[in-house]
């Protein structure tokens, strides 16, 4: 093509149509994931509040599910996602009601509701072992898993481990010394976990192996939450150890999904900063700490991270130092010295095969040097937009990167 872009990046790009071209089949064929040998695929996002990212990721999830993946794991509370999984896996309840239990606003959107409905329809008529599960991998309040653990024990061993379960349900009381209370809650979780181990055979016979596995996992989740709370509150304000511990424990939760769930792999839906390999590279105090994606990569599995970037437009986020819910913010053209600006000069949207481009002699050095990508977390400071970029080595961080020229905000359910 005589009018094809001359930038060598374009030779490694796969253009696709707008994610709203076909509302019934969003980009399932237009933007497939390059993951022929992956068993964990991390789908990132430059903002938590961009509609185009959510639509494209929904299409990628459909593509992966149709290829045999059977778990979709969100950067969301493990316990709070249980009603969402119950809707998708068993058809119980309503997706909007299930999502309303999440404390994090970014998943309470029409775009997430739509992919949950598709996953539920995919599961209809399939045997339980071939149905898709929806999981959370993020950390919760230590007391959050208690209702599910108590409900399980009431069906298999009424009254069992009652005192320990009550301690879990009380969680962290504000008048108690934090470390002492964390010790108490973690000990209660181990007590319930030991009880489940001793009675595994009987409880599996009374209900099912997956139900036992879930209850046992929730006890470990409580212990992990206690570990995280202990570290994150050891210092005032955000600090590297707290973020590092969070991503370490999220990686452990994702690994549990891969080990226990059926299917050929799992999809992890989270921010670019968590799914990328290497370190956070986001200019924050924890910038040099290892990410969840790096830990999944080190674990020896076949991990494929996919990053997302955008040129300009609007998105939803909470205001830095604000007290309200998410707002809609807008940004203009990207910094001229950024990777985002170079992508923006190409006809978008497209998927860049970073792995292939990195082996191109014309591009290897550029991809191996630190480059800026847009980065907006759950919180955005409109007074400092120039600082909100990742500065990362693309070849080290991602195997592929999706670029859309313009962002529009996600549609809130509430």
Image (cartoon, rainbow, N blue to C red):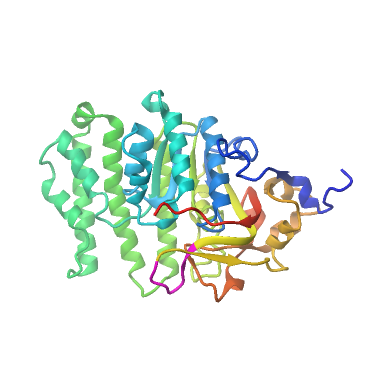
Percent x, y of residue 85: 36, 39
145 displayed left or right of 283: left
- Residue 318 falls in which quadrant of the image? bottom left
Which residue is located at x 74 percent, y 60 percent? 342
Q: Is residue 329 above or below residue 401?
A: below
359 displayed left or right of 90: right
| Magenta region | 317-324
Q: Main secondary structure of the magenta part?
A: loop
Q: Nearer the viewer, residue 269 or 362?
A: 269
**Which quadrant of the rendered structure holds the C terminus?**
bottom left
Q: Nearer the viewer, residue 142 or 1?
A: 1
300 displayed left or right of 132: right
Q: Is residue 321 above or below residue 62?
A: below
347 displayed left or right of 215: right
Q: Is residue 294 magenta?
A: no
Q: Nearer the viewer, residue 13 or 29?
A: 29
Q: Is residue 320 magenta?
A: yes
Percent x, y of residue 325: 40, 64
Percent x, y of residue 380: 50, 68
């Amino acid at each position: 093509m005589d009018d094809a872009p001359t930038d060598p990046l374009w030779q490694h790009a796969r253009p696709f149509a707008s994610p709203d071209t076909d509302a019934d089949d969003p980009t399932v064929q237009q933007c497939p994931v390059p993951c022929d040998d992956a068993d964990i695929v991390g789908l990132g996002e430059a903002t938590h509040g961009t509609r185009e990212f959510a639509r494209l990721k929904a299409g990628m999830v459909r593509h992966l599910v149709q290829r045999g993946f059977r778990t979709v794991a969100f950067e969301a509370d493990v316990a709070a996602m249980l009603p969402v999984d119950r809707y998708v896996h068993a058809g119980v309840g309503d997706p909007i009601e299930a999502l309303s239990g999440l404390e994090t606003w970014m998943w309470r959107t029409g775009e997430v509701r739509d992919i949950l409905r598709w996953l539920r329809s995919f599961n209809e008529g399939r045997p339980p072992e071939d149905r898709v599960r929806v999981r959370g991998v993020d950390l919760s309040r230590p007391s959050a898993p208690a209702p599910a653990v108590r409900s399980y024990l009431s069906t298999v061993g009424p009254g069992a481990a009652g005192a320990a379960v009550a301690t879990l349900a009380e969680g962290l009381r504000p008048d108690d010394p934090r470390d002492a209370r964390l010790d108490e809650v973690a000990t209660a979780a181990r007590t319930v976990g030991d009880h489940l181990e001793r009675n595994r055979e009987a409880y599996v016979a009374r209900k099912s192996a997956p139900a036992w596995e879930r209850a046992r996992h929730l006890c470990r989740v409580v212990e992990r939450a206690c570990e995280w709370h202990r570290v994150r509150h050891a210092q005032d304000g955000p600090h590297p150890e707290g973020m590092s511990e969070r991503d370490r424990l999220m990686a452990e939760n994702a690994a549990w999904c891969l080990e226990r769930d059926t299917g050929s792999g799992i999809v992890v839906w989270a921010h670019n900063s968590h799914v990328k390999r290497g370190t956070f590279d986001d200019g924050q105090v924890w910038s040099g700490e290892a990410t969840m994606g790096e830990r999944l990569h080190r674990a020896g599995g076949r991990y494929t991270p996919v990053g997302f970037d955008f040129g300009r437009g609007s998105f939803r986020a909470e205001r830095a130092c604000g007290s309200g819910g998410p707002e809609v913010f807008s940004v203009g053209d990207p910094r001229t010295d950024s990777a985002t600006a170079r992508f923006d000069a190409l006809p978008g949207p497209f998927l860049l095969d970073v792995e292939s481009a990195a082996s191109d002699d014309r591009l290897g050095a550029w991809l191996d040097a630190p480059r800026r990508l847009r980065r907006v977390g759950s919180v955005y400071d409109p007074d400092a937009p120039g600082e909100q970029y990742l500065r990362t080595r693309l070849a080290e961080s991602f195997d592929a990167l999706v670029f859309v020229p313009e962002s529009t905000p996600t549609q809130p359910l509430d």
